[in-house]
Amino acid sequence: MILSIESSCDDSSIAITKIDDYKLIYHKKISQDLEHSVYGGVVPELAARLHTEALPKILEECKEYFPHLKAIAVTNEPGLSVTLLEGVMMAKALSLTLNIPLIAVNHLKGHIYSLFINQKAVMPLSVLLVSGGHTQIIEATSLNNMKVVAKTQDDSFGESFDKVAKMLGLGYPGGPVVAKMAVDGDEKAYDFPIPLKNSPNIEFSYSGLKNAVRLAIESEQQNLQPSTFNLQPEFIQNICASFEYTAVAHLMQKLKKYFKLTRPKIFAIVGGASANIRLRGELEKLCHEYDCKLLLSPLEFCSDNAAMIGRCAIEQYNLGDFSDINSLDISPRSSF
Ligand code: KG4
Ligand code: ZN
């Protein structure tokens, strides 16, 4: 079995996975959403402090598996430096104490392997990674052959949901709450421009849309009477619906170009924002149109978790891809 640790951002998570049949034996995640919510985003120092409380608590539950462990896996890139360090320090201590090798896992590859928890991997495939930090199309041929073929020029898809939620005072993370508010709103209430609509390039941008939403909110606030200064629920729902509609329409417009050009046989969406129901629905339609198989991670494994890190680590274990305990370091900004 492999014990895997994930602490690249605001989720403390540990998993135990069987190497021979990919079975997830144990998985626990302690999320810090509530603590960061009051700040409207992740505060790295607070995240680091919360990891120091949560990770040892989870590890305590895993002790019975220690005699069966063949390796310790940990996310070492990319992510927040202070929080990545916590996982890596714990992994090094475990590797030393149990005298088993260390496996350093790339968080983005981990998201891709979230598709294959409890099962064998299928490649090649094209993947849309949509998270708080990334919006990319990746062509994956194998574990060590993954190429980013399109990415965002500024904000990411998930981050734009977080920023809209912050502007509306809806807390953090923004994705689930904005998507929920959008259900009862009118997607045509605000005609936000679809980003890069006339550009022939397959690339993404969310800062313009975020600003358009900000202007609409400011304009509404100016119209409010001091006695009813709070934004009304109907306004919030309409903004959320129009924003989500446009954010997804932008992704889909570019994905249609990508499908036309490359005609992928297998397409997947991964990352925290791949839980978005509107996006899932639109992609189902597109894949159907192109007779392409759509792979989706189970909802519980879309956002950051150690199960995906453990699943990726099995591939590395089988290739003998281990890290030296003295030289293993974090790499907060790396991609693949
Ligand atoms: O993958 P993840 O857990 O963390 C990163 O690696 O960034 O993704 C978290 C991101 C947040 O920005 C969150 O707002 C977004 O995923 N998210 C969503 C939804 N659920 C989570 N965005 C849009 N719609 C959702 N339903
Ligand atoms: Zn992530």
Image: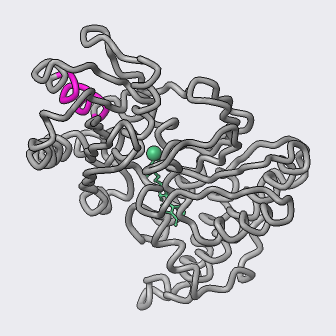
The image shows residue 304 at horizontal and vertical percentages of 40, 49
Q: Residue at x 43, y 51 (%)?
A: 118
* Rendered-image quadrant of the C terminus: top right
141 relative to 155, above or below: above
Q: Is residue 316 left or right of residue 55?
A: right
Judging depth in this view, the residue of 197 and 30 nearest the camera is: 30
The answer to which quarter of the image holds residue 48 is: top left
The image shows residue 267 at horizontal and vertical percentages of 71, 51
Judging depth in this view, the residue of 5 and 21 nearest the camera is: 21
Count of numbered tags: 0
Q: Which residues are magenta?
A: 83-92
Q: Is residue 120 left or right of residue 254?
A: left
The image shows residue 217 at horizontal and vertical percentages of 58, 72
* Rendered-image quadrant of the N terminus: top left
Q: Main secondary structure of the magenta part?
A: helix
Judging depth in this view, the residue of 27 and 38 nearest the camera is: 27
115 relative to 5, above or below: below
Q: Is residue 179 magenta?
A: no
144 relative to 13, above or below: above
* Residue 152 visible in the displayed image: no
Q: Residue at x 58, y 23 (%)?
A: 144
The image shows residue 186 at horizontal and vertical percentages of 67, 85
* Residue 120 visible in the displayed image: yes
Judging depth in this view, the residue of 287 and 316 nearest the camera is: 316
Q: Residue at x 56, y 82 (%)?
A: 237
Q: Residue at x 30, y 10 (%)?
A: 324
Q: Is residue 279 left or right of residue 179?
A: right
